[in-house]
Image: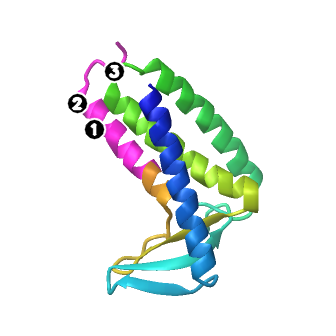
Amino acid sequence: MWIYLIVMVGLVAIDQVIKAAIVSHIALGASTTVVPGLLSLTNLHNNGAAWSILEGKMWFFYLISVVALIVMVYLLWRLRDKWLYELGITLMIAGTLGNFIDRLRIGYVVDMFQLDFINFPIFNFADSCLTVGVIVILIGVLRDDSFDK
């Protein structure tokens, strides 16, 4: 169980370091191409969710984040003997914490990864942790027909 806590703290730290680097090296709203036609880095301040859904409703994101963290910590403890679920939930907690820290500290989430080949919301490392965590849990559910055991 300690390894997951270490991974979680490490992922949150990586998220915060990336965000700090973007804010200090790229002007707000500016973009820098990393791989032409594929990926750019952008400094975007998002006070909503994907595509700026619920923009400005920070109280809602505070509430959802706290409730989600409580549920995920409970599930992490409840499923502590199933490594795939532990890994997925650890990733999801790290992602939730990374964005929650931004909202509490600066009032918005810093997003930076822009996929240039598709119309997709600009996202950050924490969002990636959340997405990969959901995929890992889905794989666990599909592999495990005894989820309730």
Looking at the picture, the colour scheme in use is: rainbow
| Region of the chain picked out in magenta, as a range | 130-149
Q: Quadrant of the N terminus?
A: top left
Q: Is residue 133 magenta?
A: yes
Q: Are marks 3 and 2 in contact (CB under 8 Å)?
A: no
Circle 1 residue: 139
Q: For the residues marked 1 and 3, what is the alpha-carbon distance in whole angstroms?
A: 12 Å
Q: Residue furthest top?
A: 149
The main secondary structure of the magenta stretch is helix
Q: Which mark is residue 147?
A: 3
Q: Residue 91 placed where, x, y %? A: 44, 43
Tell me which corner region of the image, top left, top right, bottom left or bottom right, holds residue 116.
bottom left
- Vertical side of 24 occupied by 18: above or below: above
Q: Amino acid at mark 3?
A: Phe
Residue 34 colored in magenta in the image: no
Q: Residue at x 32, y 32 (%)?
A: 84
Q: Is residue 125 above or below residue 135?
A: below
What percent of the width, then of the height, locates residue 85? 37, 30
x then y, percent, for residue 32: 47, 86
Q: Secondary structure at mark 1?
A: helix
Alpha carbons under labels 2 and 1: distance apart? 6 Å
User: Is label 2 in contact with label 1 (beta carbons under 8 Å)?
Assistant: yes
The residue pinned by badge 2 equals 143
Q: Amino acid at mark 1?
A: Ile
The local secondary structure at tag 3 comes to loop
Q: Residue at x 51, y 85 (%)?
A: 31
Looking at marks 1 and 3 on the same chain, the residue that comes earlier in the sequence is marked by 1
